[in-house]
């Protein structure tokens, strides 16, 4: 007997009023680490919310780990979900937040404390876990979301844009964590609109665009197309002029724009740029608080894919 | 790895809701102002002249249950499911193996139980004062109608038995005219031995009212992000417009609840009976105390179990 597929969608369509978010999606995902890639508005979050049973498909069937995802709470014994938004009960500390959610999960307070501590350590959140959440930076919030998703040791982890807005250190840590989870034999489905982030974690991707799955397979097949389009990266920093001066010396930067609290660069070789950035920031002593990658380059590729 | 249980999930949900409910100094100010102040005002502003039923207990009925305290407390404190859904925190609650209806029940318990305890505090705090101020006699003032002076007595001032409805005496003044006099009569306070029962009735009444109102507003919070919009409308319509008419006032829920508490104790005190005019029937009690909150809660569980949680992203 073979293990059930991690995710099976058959003709799944989901609409919100007049807006169709997913259109007739049929896909089987066996497992492992899979990147869900697509520009903003592609339907990634809707896909993941159906996977996690937050909403039912309007049409079609969605199965996760051998059963329907909707109205199947026991599924969450095996699934951990890290949503895309940054809302918490801000009056709690990070540790209390994870413990409280383990309580709702059904664990005793003693068990919740032990499990939360382990999970917080795993995401390297020990330093700030006892501070109130309203004092957290974007990166700390990302770590906290991961901690609550990992705390009950799930078999399938669903991560919705976990690198969005993260600083270079968090980015590196999350990528390492996802790879480690993959090595442990867990299924991880991670959404992003930045190919290079996904590529750093897994070669297996599902491409979505305008609510449809356009392709599924190896990331290397599409990166050739991606690289033909210059890549934009926005870095938030309190010292944009200093950072711009530092970046201007880099060969991988083709264009550069300075904003009030951010620097935007365009680069033809994003891989090298992403690899070099943490070192640059440390050497220059310039704090980079957030990195955003607008999806215009990916959107261009999807236009290429869909319109020829 | 320890095994999770549904009961622990219920408790976990209740703990989060209780923390949301009682979180922050602003909410405590609202709860204390709304909960304790009316009770304290009742004690110090209104004296305990009438021993038959302590004014504080009457005020619980008139002011506290129906009025400002509960309204303000509910207004500021009940965390709504809709606001959780709006800001996305409900996703954390519902991506758990605990069934949604259990999470809803937990949240209800975590909201309504602290509310009820807070509502009971002023009653308990006021009770020692009520005991200290109680009178052994009930004092009534009778306004006698002048009656004809008995024949032959016109010129003999003194006191004569009255034939008026309240008994007492008629005083004949020296000039031969009967005085129109207000008589003060003392009767034994029949409630004196039943003070404990009064307290119990007040506690039961407050508990039931808090459960009724709490559940009602909790359920509104499932549908509306700002349940106090309904609370304002409710208060304006029921407490001001309806409350202005005594005959209509008897139909307000809190009065019914308080009367029901007495009914369950096998007595309807005269002060309530006179307002109430009719004692609530067993069916009314059942509907008021069980069916309405149960229906509200059942509806909330059903709606939340079927609701798709849609965020801002696509």
Image (tube, coloured by chain):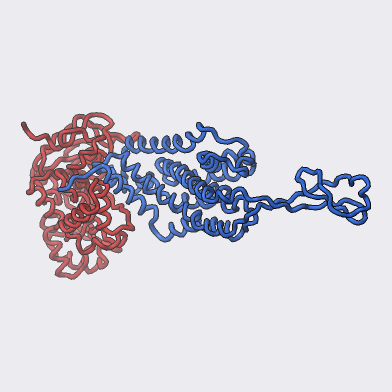
Chain colours: A red, B blue
Q: Position of residue A60 (x, y in %)?
A: 23, 29
In the figure, is residue B126 to the left or right of B77? Answer: right
Q: Is residue A90 visible?
A: yes
Q: Residue furthest left?
A: A1
Q: Nearer the viewer, residue A202 or A74?
A: A74
Q: Position of residue A87 (x, y in %)?
A: 31, 52
Q: Position of residue B26 (x, y in %)?
A: 44, 59
Identify the residue at image location x=8%, y=48%. Answer: A184
Q: Nearer the viewer, residue A299 or B92?
A: B92
In the figure, is residue A3 to the left or right of B7? Answer: left
In the figure, is residue B143 to the left or right of A72? Answer: right
In the figure, is residue A207 to the left or right of B287? Answer: left
Q: Position of residue A146 (x, y in %)?
A: 20, 52
Query: From the viewer's perspective, is residue B233 above or below residue A283?
Result: above
Q: Quadrant of the C terminus of chain B?
A: top left
Label count reads 0
Q: Quadrant of residue A244?
A: bottom left
Identify the residue at image location x=32%, y=39%. Answer: B101
Query: From the viewer's perspective, is residue B43 above or below residue A295?
Result: below
Query: From the viewer's perspective, is residue A61 above or below residue B76?
Result: above
Identify the residue at image location x=63%, y=41%. Answer: B275
Identify the residue at image location x=28%, y=31%. Answer: A58
Q: Is residue A41 visible?
A: no
């Amino acid at each position: 007997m073979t293990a059930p597929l991690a995710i099976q969608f058959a003709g799944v369509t989901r609409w919100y009023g007049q807006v169709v978010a997913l259109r007739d999606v049929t896909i089987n995902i066996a497992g492992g680490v899979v990147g869900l890639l697509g520009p903003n508005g592609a339907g990634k979050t809707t896909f993941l919310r159906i996977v996690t049973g937050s909403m039912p498909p309007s049409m079609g069937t969605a199965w996760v780990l051998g059963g329907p995802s909707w109205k199947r709470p026991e599924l969450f014994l095996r699934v951990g979900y890290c949503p895309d938004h940054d809302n918490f009960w801000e009056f709690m500390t990070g540790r209390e937040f994870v413990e409280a959610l383990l309580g709702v999960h059904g664990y005793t307070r003693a068990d919740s404390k032990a499990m939360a501590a382990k999970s917080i350590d795993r995401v390297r959140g020990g330093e700030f876990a006892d501070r109130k959440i309203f004092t957290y930076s974007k990166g700390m919030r990302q770590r906290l979301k991961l901690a609550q998703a990992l705390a009950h040791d799930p078999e399938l982890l669903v991560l919705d844009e976990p690198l969005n807005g993260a600083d270079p250190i968090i980015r590196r840590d999350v990528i390492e964590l996802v790879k480690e989870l993959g090595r442990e034999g867990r299924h991880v489905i991670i959404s992003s609109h930045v190919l290079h982030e996904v590529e750093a974690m897994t070669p297996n991707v599902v491409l979505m665009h305008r609510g449809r799955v356009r392709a599924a397979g190896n990331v290397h097949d599409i990166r050739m197309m991606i690289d033909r389009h210059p890549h934009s990266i926005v870095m938030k920093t309190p010292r944009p002029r200093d950072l711009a001066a530092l970046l201007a010396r880099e060969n991988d930067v083709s264009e550069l724009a300075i904003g009030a609290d951010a620097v935007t660069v365009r680069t033809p070789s994003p891989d090298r740029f992403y690899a070099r950035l943490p070192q640059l920031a440390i050497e220059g002593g310039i704090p980079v608080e957030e990195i955003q990658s607008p999806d215009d380059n990916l959107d261009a590729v999807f236009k290429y894919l869909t319109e020829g | 790895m320890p095994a999770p249980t549904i009961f622990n999930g219920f408790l976990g949900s209740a703990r989060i809701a209780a923390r949301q409910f009682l979180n922050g100094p602003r909410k405590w100010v609202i709860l204390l102002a709304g909960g304790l102040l009316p009770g304290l005002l009742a004690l110090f502003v209104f004296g305990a002249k009438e021993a038959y039923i302590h004014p504080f207990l009457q005020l619980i009925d008139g002011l506290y249950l129906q009025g400002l305290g509960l309204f303000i407390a509910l207004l500021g404190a009940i965390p709504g499911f809709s606001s959780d859904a709006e800001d996305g925190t409900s996703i954390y609650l519902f991506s758990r193996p605990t069934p949604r209806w259990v999470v809803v029940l937990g949240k209800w318990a975590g909201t309504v139980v602290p509310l009820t305890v807070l509502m009971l505090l002023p009653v308990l705090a006021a009770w020692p004062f009520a005991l200290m101020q109680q009178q052994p006699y009930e004092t009534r003032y009778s306004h006698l109608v002048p009656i004809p002076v008995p024949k032959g007595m016109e010129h003999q001032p003194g006191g004569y038995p009255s034939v008026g409805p309240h008994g007492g005496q008629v005083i004949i003044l020296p000039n031969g005219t009967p005085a129109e006099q207000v008589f003060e009569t003392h009767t034994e306070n029949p409630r004196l031995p039943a003070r404990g029962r009064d307290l119990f009735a007040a506690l039961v009444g407050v508990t039931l009212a808090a459960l009724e109102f709490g559940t009602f507003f909790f359920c509104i919070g499932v549908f509306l992000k700002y349940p106090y919009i309904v609370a304002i409308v409710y208060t304006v319509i029921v407490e001001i417009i309806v409350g202005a008419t005594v005959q209509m006032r008897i139909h307000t829920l809190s009065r019914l609840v308080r009367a029901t508490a007495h009914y369950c104790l096998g007595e309807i005190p005269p002060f309530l009976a006179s307002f109430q005019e009719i004692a609530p029937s067993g069916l009314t009690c059942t509907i008021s105390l069980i069916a309405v909150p149960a229906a509200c809660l059942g509806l909330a569980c059903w709606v939340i179990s079927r609701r798709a949680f849609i965020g801002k992203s696509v």
